[in-house]
Image: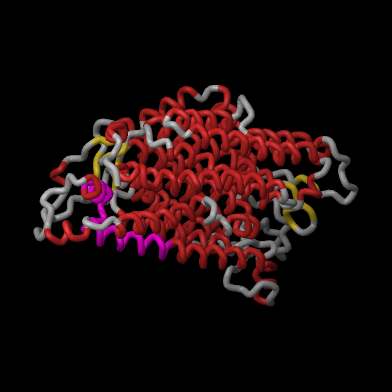
Amino acid sequence: MSSAPSAVHSLWTLADQSTSSTIGTFTQPHVQYAQLSPMLIVTGAAVLGILAEAFVPRKGRYWTQIGIALTGLVAAFVAIVLLAADGYAGAKADLAVQGAVAVDGPALFLQGTILLISIVAVLGFAERRLETGTAANGAPVDAFTPQAAAVPGSDAEKSAVRSGFATTEVYPLTMFAVVGMLLFPAAGDLLTMFIALEVFSLPLYLLCALARRRRLLSQEAAVKYFLLGAFSSAFFLFGLALLYGYAGTVSLSGIAAVVSGTESPVTPALANTTGNDALLLIGMAMIGVGLLFKVGAVPFHSWTPDVYQGAPTPVTGFMAAATKVAAFGALLRLLYVAFPGLTWDFRPVMWGVAILTMVVGSIIAVTQTDVKRLLAYSSIAHAGFILTGVIAMNKAGISAVLFYLGAYSFVTLGAFAVVTLVRDAGGEATHLSRWAGLGRRSPLVAAVFALFLLAFAGIPLTSGFAGKFAVFQAAAASGATPLVIVGVLSSAVAAFFYIRVIVLMFFSDPRPDGPSVAVPSVFTGTAIALGVAVTLVLGILPQYFLHLAGQASVFIH
């Protein structure tokens, strides 16, 4: 175990030490409600959504739930902006609720990104023009099963379809997931981080099982995600217990103090446990497993393609974007706040994980014949690219990761929104062969999807290029040049399968029985337009947003 590099401490700002309580003394907790207002607003929207399910007539629930969800998310984003403008992203950064929640630059930046992602995702959830409804009253239907409790293919399900039922519970479930995602990267201790992990994971397990089409595949995806997610949560919790046994605290800054040897006073019990680093290293590794599972890094990626393929496509887009942002935010906080003194211990392992993730994601994606599975392996490869920025362990690495997460999220949301438009009699036509000649049948949709694919590939003048350049530059500055070389080669492999899809769309003859391109409502149209706008703006004029990410790259300690 080595001492912390001096450069790391420039990434910290110290909290008011009066927030820590003396062992053995009960201190009345002081809750800073204003600093927690974004999470409280979204929680209130989630609770209102549940009450709406109970008291609003079925016919009025759809618009009521959309209104509650969008109002709550927009209000929470305004609260984030006000906190940042008030200085909490810089000099006034604080550890709220007795040190359990960090209110600092990275937390506010990531929370703002998650809220913007969620607003776009809710627009995708609200789409009702794409599915062909079979309700007796001709009511439009969305991508979600009409009655989640009904057995697929049963009389109860057929009756729910004819009656025009809708599973509007997806909106409060999404709000609860967003609450957990907001808390996850802001957690100041491991126990709060674990609670946040469970709060956003459990609604996602349910959302994955609610597809209107191919319900058995959707339910299979949900079960896989739940079982593997439960294992990863168990790893995280076991690692938490081992770290508590080592350091005598679950506070991230407290663990850092024990690791660096600056903890005072040193009790006999603490001296006994810190004499052996086994608890520390094993605990850190087990918590790492839990977090790397959530970001979809190899070798903890096996759930990703199956879940992305089986889940309702709007949910897939939401998961692919928001979950990555929250999980990478938590990983950054853990490594930069709790374990800066262990950089030389975890960095070689993270190198191996990043290389495996980039290589495996890029190579296996080449063999995929389903668009959603291809985007899933693309997401795995991008997790590897982001890890190169995490490994940099410098301020440029933090700002590059923050920028990359924002840029990648909107490209992903836009790409999955386009996937929902290409349809045949069985619903979404996700097999690649069905996309042949799409550029001739619908040039605009094909051009938009091609733009998103070029952004994934990192082509200049797209947000993907600016993001990759930033993380690779930060990694190279930290001495990880071999990692950058692997990243560039993996990007070249990834570019092959992205361009292959573009060639298939524009240079192949359309099939006579090919799919049609549905005309979306204003909801999906807005989601796609926002994805295009962010992709181009961050690609052509990235400097302001890179500067913003750089200003938000100092953790409270």
- Residue at (54%, 32%) from the top-left corner? 468
Q: Which of 490 and 109 is in front in this view?
A: 490
Q: Nearer the viewer, residue 150 or 452?
A: 452
* In the image, residue 252 above or below residue 426: above
Q: Along the horizontal axis of the image, is 103 left or right of 370?
A: left
- Residue at (57%, 72%) from the top-left corner? 149
Q: Which of 438 and 293 is in front in this view?
A: 293
The stretch in magenta equals: 233-257
Point out the residue furthest to the bottom here: 155
Q: Along the horizontal axis of the image, is 27 left or right of 167?
A: left
- Tell me, what colour scheme is on the image? secondary structure
List x then y, in percent, for residue 446: 74, 37
List x then y, in percent, for residue 358: 57, 44
List x then y, in percent, for residue 240: 32, 60
- Residue at (16%, 57%) from the top-left corner? 271
List x then y, in percent, for residue 349: 44, 48
Q: Along the horizontal axis of the image, is 238 left or right of 474?
A: left
Q: How many labels does the image show?
A: 0
Q: In which quarter of the image is the C terminus?
A: top left
* In the image, residue 547 above or below residue 297: above
Whether residue 424 is visible, yes or no, is: yes
Is the stretch drawn in magenta largely helix, strand or loop?
helix
> Image quadrant of residue 232?
bottom left
Task: Confirm whether the magenta stretch covers residue 256.
Answer: yes
> Image quadrant of residue 418?
top right
* In the image, residue 135 above or below residue 87: below
Q: Along the horizontal axis of the image, is 144 left or right of 475?
A: right
Task: Confirm whether the magenta stretch covers residue 267.
Answer: no
